[in-house]
Amino acid sequence: MDQPLRELTPEEIAGFDQDGVIHARNLFSQDWIERMTQAVDRVVASPTFLGNVVSMKEQRFSGDLFLWKVDDDFLAWVYDSPAALIAQQLLRSEKIRHFYDQLFVKPANCPVPTPWHHDVTFWPVDVNCRALCSIWITFDPVDPGNGGLEFIKGSHRWPGRYKAVTPNYDPYMLDSDFEDLPDIDARRDDYDLFSPSLEAGDCLIFNAQVVHGGAANKSSDKPRRAFSSRWAGDDVVFEDRHATMPLLWNHGLKTGDPIGGTLFPQVLPRSIQAEGSRRAQGAEPPEPAFVKRVLEDIAARQ
């Protein structure tokens, strides 16, 4: 496993705890940035099944999930990049598991905003679990005009849990027992908002509970290609709720089980051979029975 170019500073770690989000530079080598830029472009050109489900091609928005299961560059990111070591610094966990990965590409003139949300209610975990973080890395310069993310500092400490929301306001995700978020844009002055400009290779690292969103890409010439890897530390518990992201591989987990196994493999302090042996043999496409279920759900909503 490669080491990060530098350790996170005590100030960055304190900022993650206090604000729920940090902007971090100079963590990944240029080799990793170039490798993953090419991988992102390749996946956008040839999306997976999940990519076709979550993308909005008419609006030019491309998304994808669980790329590490089928693409070797994303697999390498899990086991060979410094990402797990960075997550371990922030989560202070002995064990670090890869939760999943997700692609967010907004080319120039992409009109799709990312609604205000927090991630934890989108995920099949106990929503009070704290040992979860995302490392969101951009492969293009980002500013508020081309789809930069915006966070509410400290919102990870809010007591409420809110409905998951996707860019296309998918009713599958909105069918939730959680409450609606407050109208943040109507009262922006009431919040401590954070929306840094980024250079290619910069990261936003944030807590699963922090509230965030993103604007449309209003630029005529600035793409925004970004990729997020999600990481789980100690004491993250699976919860089989409705209105969470589809899982297209048999994971064998039931509510109350610790996150683990072949879908959520351990990376630190060392990988577990039994968890990665099937994927090590080659690409592991989604299992047909699970795909069939998602397609039936989509058809039922139309």
Image (cartoon, rainbow, N blue to C red):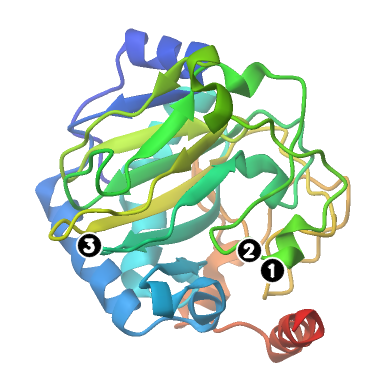
Q: Mark 2 = which residue? A: 263
Choose mark 3 or mark 1, whichever is in front.
3
Measured as percent of width and height from the top left, residue 45 is found at 30, 82
Nearer-N-terminus badge (3/2): 3
Which three-letter amino acid code belongs to the residue tagged 2? Leu
Report how far apart the C-alphas of labels 3 and 1 lie in the structure.
31 Å
When asked about the image quadrant of residue 262, the answer is: bottom right
Along the horizontal axis of the image, is 214 left or right of 96? left
Nearer-N-terminus badge (3/1): 3
Report how far apart the C-alphas of labels 3 and 2 lie in the structure.
34 Å
Report how far apart the C-alphas of labels 2 and 1 lie in the structure.
9 Å
Above or below residue 75? Residue 164 is above
When asked about the image quadrant of residue 221, the answer is: bottom left
- Badge 1 crowding class, 10 Å Cα cut-off, few under 14, some 14 to 19, many 20 or more, is some
Along the horizontal axis of the image, is 51 left or right of 138? right
Nearer-N-terminus badge (2/1): 1
Contact (CB < 8 A) between labels 2 and 1?
Answer: yes
Above or below residue 248? Residue 85 is above
In terms of depth relative to the viewer, which is nearer, 122 or 87?
A: 122
Which three-letter amino acid code belongs to the residue tagged 1? Leu
Which residue is at a point 35% across and 56% down the rendered structure image? 77
- Badge 2 crowding class, 10 Å Cα cut-off, few under 14, some 14 to 19, many 20 or more, is many
Above or below residue 207? Residue 285 is below
In terms of depth relative to the viewer, which is nearer, 130 or 192?
A: 192
Which residue is at a point 45% across and 67% down the rendered structure image? 63
Choose mark 3 or mark 2, whichever is in front.
3
Whether residue 93 appears in this view of the structure is no
Q: Secondary structure at mark 2?
A: loop
Residue 108's mark?
3
Q: Mark 1 = which residue? A: 247
